[in-house]
Image (tube, rainbow, N blue to C red):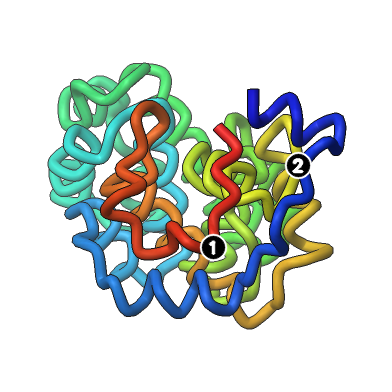
Amino acid sequence: MLSLLFVYGKINFMDVNIDKIVENLIKADQPRSDFVQLMEGFQNPYLVLIACILSLRTNDKTTYPATLRMLEIGRKPEDFACCDVERLSKAIYPVGFYANKAKQIVELSKEIVEKYNGKVPETIEELVKFNGVGRKTANLVLAKGFNTPAICVDVHVHRIFNRLGYVKTKTPEETEFALREKLPVKYWLDINTLMVTHGQNVCKPQKPLCDKCPINKFCNKIL
């Protein structure tokens, strides 16, 4: 009911204080999944790219050990460009669509070696040319791999910003462009990690733990 009332403008919602939200989420210091911590530590666009591919439609608990097994094979495009697809498939099993992802990583690595001289391109426009790479992955590569301000919008970021009432969008891509217009650039690099962590621990899709939420008083609770 709240969401319907919100859409038709029958309730005056409070303005969302994004500065206070970010400040309180940082102070809360919620536990990050092993996979999120691994991605934070890469600081390497290629590793961020292939790990992100593994994570699509797969939970962090499954993706983390699969990523570690993949890294035993190699850490550079040259390592995977000549990798046997079946070997990689076995290493990353049981991530979702593991066989397709193994083939995708090998082909993508070959393209990086042959077309980009072994270097991951630094623009969204070039990144999304790779098969299976969308804006979410491209933005994460820019932010975590190149330290370039970019907004990676996954299901957590999309859900939480709409629940807060900070944006009113229907898809993650709409959310990305809405945040590009509204969210201060100083938050772009870290907002994905903050919201993913908050979404995994507290602001869950079903039955969010509002009584334990460090930003409860700043939220319009658009469910």
Task: Quadrant for residue 162, please give it.
Answer: top right
What amino acid is found at the position of numbered circle 2 in the picture?
Answer: Lys
Q: Few, some or many C-alpha atoms within 10 Å of disc 1 (few <14, some 14-19, many ≥20)?
A: some
What amino acid is found at the position of numbered circle 1 in the picture?
Answer: Phe
Q: Which residue is mark 1?
A: 218
> Of circles 1 and 2, which is in front?
1
Residue 95 position, x and y percent, is 26, 25
Is residue 185 placed above or below 100 in the rendered structure? Answer: below
Q: Which structural element holds mark 2?
A: loop
On the question of residue 126 being in view, the answer is no
Mark drawn on residue 168: 2
Residue at 49%, 71% in the rendered image: 190
Toward the viewer: 22 or 213?
A: 213
Mark drawn on residue 65: none
Q: Which structural element holds mark 1?
A: helix
Toward the viewer: 48 or 221?
A: 221
Residue at 17%, 54% in the rendered image: 34
Is residue 26 placed above or below 218 in the rendered structure? Answer: below
Residue 116 position, x and y percent, is 63, 58
Q: Few, some or many C-alpha atoms within 10 Å of disc 2 (few <14, some 14-19, many ≥20)?
A: some
Q: Quadrant of the N terminus?
A: top right
Q: Quadrant of the C terminus?
A: top right
Task: Quadrant for residue 69, please give it.
Answer: top left
Q: CA distance from mark 1 to mark 2?
A: 16 Å
Residue at 33%, 20% in the rendered image: 96
Residue 204 position, x and y percent, is 36, 37
